[in-house]
Image (spheres, helix red, strand yellow):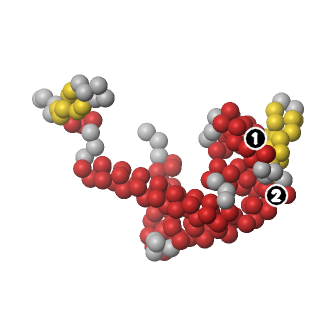
């Protein structure tokens, strides 16, 4: 039996024959695009609402809430980088900018650096939390009915736990 092929163009304009089994079906592609569009749109709207009301960027909010809540006011810089999925150098540059704005400080500790939220940083978290909650409700929770939320949550949990 022969495998059906479809031509596909590469970045250098050469044509490579890809087996059709390596391509998504129309329905699978539509699902993929709907997922990306919805996730990106909801996230962008929440980020925009928080930034418009508080001036905090999404990374600022992520750093401040993790240090304030997960670390109870201080958190190892390496653990913060891991929790954000960031390379340590990216986080270090961002923390430098946040220190210049008085939102956090850093101090050396055995084998590393600890990030400490300042009073100004705590005030920003207190100001941003209700805005974030309202934005999540408006852009994610409320557009779904109660039954849809339960189904959606179950689907997300299944995706997060699935392994090939």
Q: How dense is the environment of label 1, judged by Cα within 10 Å: few (below 14), some, or many (20 and up)?
A: some
Disc 1, SS: helix
Q: Residue at x 41, y 52 (%)?
A: 36
Give the x, y percent position of residue 143. Answer: 46, 72
Q: Does residue 22 appear in the picture of this structure?
A: yes
Q: Is residue 161 above or below residue 146?
A: above
Q: Nearer the viewer, residue 35 or 128?
A: 128
Question: Is 151 positioned to the left or the right of 82 in the image?
Answer: left
What residue is disc 2 on?
Answer: 120
Assess whether mark 2 and mark 1 are in contact (beta carbons under 8 angstroms). Answer: no
What residue is shown with label 1? Answer: 96
Q: Quadrant of residue 119?
A: bottom right
The location of residue 103, given as percent across then percent down, is 79, 52
Quadrant (top left/top right/bottom left/bottom right) for the N terminus: top left
In the depicted structure, whether residue 152 falls above or below residue 108: below
Can residue 71 be seen from the camera position used here?
no
For this view, does 48 lie left or right of residue 80? left
The crowd level at tag 2 (other Cα within 10 Å; few <14, some 14-19, many 20+) is few
* Quadrant containing the C terminus in the rendered view: top left
Which residue is rendered at x = 45% and y = 65% of the image? 151
Secondary structure type for disc 2: helix
State the residue at coordinates (64%, 49%): 59
């Amino acid at each position: 039996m022969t495998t059906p092929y479809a031509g596909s163009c590469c970045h250098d304009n050469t044509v490579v024959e890809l087996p059709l089994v390596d391509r998504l079906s129309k329905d699978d592609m539509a699902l993929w695009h709907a997922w990306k569009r919805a996730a990106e749109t909801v996230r962008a709207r929440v980020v925009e609402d928080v930034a418009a009301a508080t001036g905090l960027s999404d990374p600022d909010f992520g750093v401040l809430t993790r240090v304030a809540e997960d670390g109870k006011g201080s958190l190892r810089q390496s653990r913060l980088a891991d929790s954000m999925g960031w390379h340590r150098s990216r986080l270090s540059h961002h923390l430098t900018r946040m220190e210049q704005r008085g939102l956090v400080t850093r101090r050396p500790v055995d084998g590393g650096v600890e990030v400490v939220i300042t009073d100004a940083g705590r005030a920003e978290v207190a100001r941003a939390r209700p805005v974030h909650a309202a934005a999540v409700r408006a852009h994610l929770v409320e557009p779904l009915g109660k039954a849809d939320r339960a189904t959606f949550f179950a689907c997300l949990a299944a995706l997060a736990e699935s392994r090939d």
